[in-house]
Amino acid sequence: MKIRFNLSCPLIAAAIISACSVKPEPIQYGSDMCHTCKMTIMDRKFGGEVVTEKGKIYKFDDLNCMINFLNSGYLEEREVAFRLVIDYAQPAKLIDATQAFYLKSNEIRTPMASRLAAFESDKVMEEYKKQWNAIYLTWGEAQTQFK
């Protein structure tokens, strides 16, 4: 029996591997729904995304929806590949939730009343902190806000 090497085999293998890669996807404002509250995600300054190791993507309109989902026990810690939040100062940009800088203030009007905004830069966060008379929170502290 003779086996022929087909040049398309490597291309097919590459396509299968890339199709299985785990990565975030942009939030589609106005059409994606929040996994927790089922509201349409509208505000480009807020939101989040959880991506599992298997590639399942859960989208959220506010940090409290995302944090409540993560605290619910629906997924185990080891199942989560990405925890992402929207950078308030760069609307629609997803950033690593564990590395973000958070502000909490009554001045922050969020979709589900978390009153939390995330920032990629501590310098930008400091500008908003003064403007809103806000308190700074780490990711761990932000998570405890909704337990």
Image (cartoon, rainbow, N blue to C red):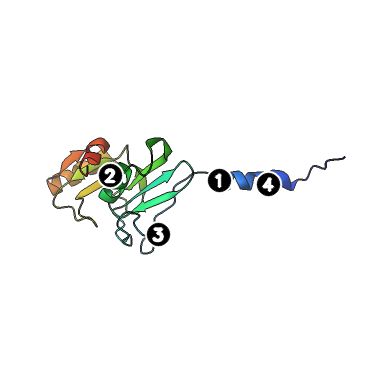
Going 22% across and 39% down the picture, which residue do you hit?
Answer: 144
Q: Residues within 10 Å of mark 1 (few under 14, many from 20)?
A: few
Q: Secondary structure at mark 2?
A: strand
- Position of residue 67 measured from the top left corner of the image (x, y, whole percent): 28, 45
As measured in the structure, the alpha-carbon distance from the residue carrying label 3 to the one carrying label 1 is: 21 Å
Q: Is residue 54 left or right of residue 69?
A: right
As measured in the structure, the alpha-carbon distance from the residue carrying label 3 to the one carrying label 4 is: 30 Å
Query: N-terminal of the two: label 3 or label 4?
Result: 4
- The amino acid at mark 4 is Leu
Q: Secondary structure at mark 4?
A: helix
Q: Residues within 10 Å of mark 4 (few under 14, many from 20)?
A: few
Q: Is residue 125 left or right of residue 14?
A: left
The disc placed on residue 119 is 2
As measured in the structure, the alpha-carbon distance from the residue carrying label 1 to the one carrying label 4 is: 14 Å
Q: Is residue 10 left or right of residue 83?
A: right
For disc 1, the marked residue is 20
**Quadrant where the C terminus lies?**
top left
For disc 3, the marked residue is 28
For disc 4, the marked residue is 11
As measured in the structure, the alpha-carbon distance from the residue carrying label 2 to the one carrying label 3 is: 20 Å
Query: N-terminal of the two: label 4 or label 2?
Result: 4
Query: N-terminal of the two: label 2 or label 3?
Result: 3
The disc placed on residue 106 is none
Query: For the residues carrying marks 3 and 1, which lies nearer the camera in this image?
Result: 1
Query: For the residues carrying marks 2 and 3, which lies nearer the camera in this image?
Result: 3
Query: N-terminal of the two: label 3 or label 1?
Result: 1
